[in-house]
Image (cartoon, grey):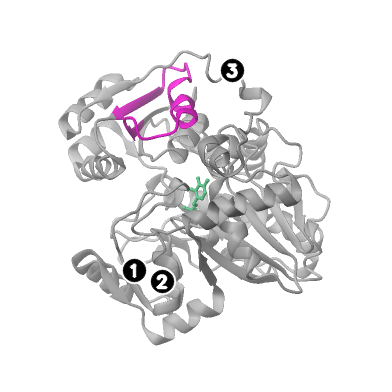
Amino acid sequence: MRYVSTRGAAPALGFAEAMLTGLARDGGLYVPETVPTLSTGQIAALAGLDYEEAAFRVMRPFVGDAFTDDEFQGAIARAYRGFGHAARAPLVQLAPNHFLLELFHGPTLAFKDFAMQLIGQLFQIALARDGRRIAIVGATSGDTGSAAIEAFRGLANVDVFILYPHGRVSEVQRRQMTTPAEANVHALALDGDFDDCQSRLKDMFNDFAFRDEVGLAGVNSINWARVLAQVVYYFTAAVSLGAPHRKVGFTVPTGNFGDIFAGYIARRMGLPIDRLVIATNQNDILHRCLTGGAYRTEGVRPSISPSMDIQISSNFERALFDAYGRDGVAIGRIMDELKQTGAFAVSQGALHWLRDQFASGRVSEEETLATIRAVHAATGELLCPHTAVGVRVAQGHLGAAPMVTLATAHPAKFPDAVEAATGLRSALPPRMADLFARPERVTRVANDLRAIESIVRERRRR
Ligand SMILES: *Cc1c(COP(=O)(O)O)cnc(C)c1O
């Protein structure tokens, strides 16, 4: 199995190298050269399996010879054993024909654990085999950083440094990053905002001498292995609801387009997905693009669903690559235009293709709160604000096929929005009830590249 860049000018790589590299050297994103398919019989046979076995069968064809079956099965088992629910990704019914897929039973209470826990295990195997050490450096507005720390804490061969904007993450998010006691975990509170964190991260990756010296690696959402891990729960959910013998729709609260792109891959693999619906908050670049045909960045407007507050939706490039008939030169051109002018117009053919694959909707702040309130009143379920955005959009797309909305975080991770809507505070699950009692460990850093680089140099273990 080979992976090619969406810009067509980087070398094709195997699964392990694509995972360890992250971003391709031509600035593009890695995608599989061809998408393997599962037969109707193979999909039907997933019914009733435990999550780990289903995960192995769905992902195996993408891995090639990068890992043996034993290695891959072991990684999957270790990745999900810490989840707080036996089903890993259970379904809950909200209304006739409308279901929630609860993706928040992992260690940091957001869906990012599904991918991050797995790539932590896979990195470990690949690095031990080559006797390599790396320093993972990430920037986060909250959820990605805590998921990365949980996934890599205590692993040999890896140090993990996470930059977050000082004073701008929720207390639960901060504590999840600052309370792990392992010596390879380094939480860095930067004096600046999330854009500053991302800019310093980019500067570090562009400092090639430093990059080679410390073995810099990234695990942000463009990493192909993260997308792949998310394909699995589309299969387990759809099969529970009658696939492959009937179609199932999905609505996905979307920011960087990683999670919904995984749904698109599931469909390409042969899963009969009815509608695939993009749900955005007031930062609605994707919805505007699908309805108006222009991809135009505007300033980020901070919302109560902060993990979807994005300017540029990085993984959308993967969908555009298919929309433009896998023409890497065309993708390179529109991405240059985006960089220079902040916008590009999607070609008629590509727009037609995108509208064929995806529907979309946008939800205001008031509607988000009203949805949390209404769903609680009707069902007793508390929704996190991201999930509420999804539920609201899904309500406009209900039809004959069952609709599944992805519940991307636990309500206790965003207690202020839940309380504003319902007057209730959602409790943390018992396994992390002592989060507020654990000691914190964090280093405050200036918004200065050299200062951050010297911390990474000094702290990493050798
Ligand atoms: C990251 C995140 C999202 C957005 O996911 P993408 O893959 O970036 O589209 C939605 N909800 C929550 C809670 C998240 O952490």
Tag nearer the camera, 1 or 3: 3
> Which label's residue is closer to the chain start, 2 or 3?
2
Say the numbered circle drawn on residue 337: none
Q: Which residue type carries mark 2? A: Arg
Q: Residue at x 28, y 60 (%)?
A: 26
The secondary element bearing badge 3 is classed as loop
Of 405 and 18, nearer the camera is: 405
Q: Which residue type carries mark 3? A: Asp
Q: Which residues are magenta?
A: 162-189
Say the numbered circle drawn on residue 8: 1
Mark 1 touching mark 3, by CB under 8 A?
no
The residue beneath circle 2 is: 288
Left or right of 327, for residue 210: left
Q: Give the answer, above or below, for where 374 lies relative to 161.
A: below
The residue beneath circle 3 is: 434
Q: Residue at x 47, y 16 (%)?
A: 181
The secondary element bearing badge 2 is classed as helix
Tag nearer the camera, 1 or 2: 2
Q: Give the answer, above or below, for where 79 lies relative to 320.
A: above
Q: Which residue type carries mark 1? A: Gly
Residue 348 appears in view: yes
Residues under labels 1 and 2: Cα distance?
Answer: 27 Å
Q: Residue furthest right?
A: 48
Characterize the local packing of mark 3: few (<14), some (14-19) or many (20 or more) Cα atoms within 10 angstroms.
few
The x, y position of residue 384, in whole percent, is 58, 44
> Which label's residue is closer to the chain start, 1 or 2?
1
The x, y position of residue 138, in whole percent, is 36, 38
